[in-house]
Amino acid sequence: MFLSALLVGFIGLLAITSWIGLSLYSKRKPESVANHLKKVLCIACLAIGIPVIILIGIQTILNFSPDYVFASSFGFKPPAEVRELQGRKSAFFDSGDIYLRFKANKPILDKIVASKFFPIKEQFFNWPSPQHHPPDWWNPSDSKPKLFYQALNFNQEYSSNSAFLCYDETREIVYFYYIGID
C-alpha cells in the first residue's frame, strides 16, 4: 500500500511540475501546443490517479474488516466456530501490523498454528510496545493466556516479520499480533 501511495505522489509531483512548465510556456504563445498538452496531462492524471486512489481506499476499508483481516492472515475465512471477531491491519511507510482477537475452540486454534507457528514460553512472547498502538480491545493480560506461539517469516509482505499468538483455554480467547518491517 505504501508503494501505491508513493506512486500516486510521484505522478502528482510530475503532473504539477509539467503543468507549471506548460503554463509558463503557453503564456508566451497562447495558441501553442502547450495548451493542448495541459489538457492531455490533466486527463491522463485523472485517468491514472482516480483508479489508484479508489484502490487505496478499498484496501484501507478492507483492513478494518475483521473477516478480511482474519482470512488474509490465516488463509481461510473465519469458520462459524469463530465468535466475537475483532481485527485491524495497518501499514505505514516501511512497516505494518495486524491485531486480531476472537473466541474459538481448540480445533480452530490447532488449524491456525499447524502451518507456521511453533510453541514458545510466555517470556518469549513479544508483547507489542505502546508505540505500536495496539487497539483497546487487544489486551491478552486481561485473559490470562497459557498457550503461546510464534511464527517467523509469517508472510512475504515485509522482509522481516514475526507473528505471535496466545490462547486462553478457559475462556477460548485467541490473541494474534503480527509486525512486519522492510
Image: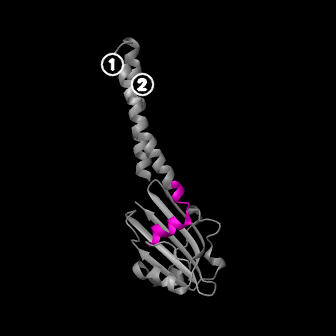
- Please tell me whether residue 45 belongs to the stretch shown in magenta: no
Q: The magenta stretch spans which residues?
A: 60-74
Q: Which residue is mark 2?
A: 20
User: Residue 86 vs residue 149: left or right?
Assistant: right
Q: How many marks?
A: 2
User: Residue 127 vs residue 12: left or right?
Assistant: right
User: Residue 98 vs residue 138: left or right?
Assistant: left
Residue 49: x percent and y percent? 43, 40
Q: Which residue is mark 1?
A: 33
Q: Residue at x 39, y 68 (%)?
A: 155
Residue 133: x percent and y percent? 59, 62
- Secondary structure beneath dot 2 equals helix
Q: Residue at x 50, y 64 (%)?
A: 97
Q: Residue at x 47, y 50 (%)?
A: 56
Q: Name the residue nearer the viewer: 77 or 95.
A: 77
In the rendered image, which quarter contains the C terminus? Answer: bottom left
Q: Is residue 177 visible?
A: yes
User: Residue 18 vs residue 146: left or right?
Assistant: left
- Mark 2, mark 1: which one is toward the viewer? 1
Classify mark 2: residues with Cα within 10 Å, few (<14), some (14-19) or many (20+).
Answer: few
- Secondary structure beneath dot 1 equals helix
Among the two numbered marks 2 and 1 on one chain, the one whose residue lies closer to the N terminus = 2
Residue 150: x percent and y percent? 46, 78
Identify the main secondary structure in magenta. helix
Mark 2 belongs to which amino acid? Ile
Mark 1 belongs to which amino acid? Val
Residue 27: x percent and y percent? 41, 14
Q: Is residue 120 visible?
A: no
Classify mark 1: residues with Cα within 10 Å, few (<14), some (14-19) or many (20+).
Answer: few
- Distance between mark 2 and mark 1 Cα atoms: 15 Å
**From what the image shows, is residue 28 above or below residue 108?**
above
Q: Residue furthest front?
A: 80
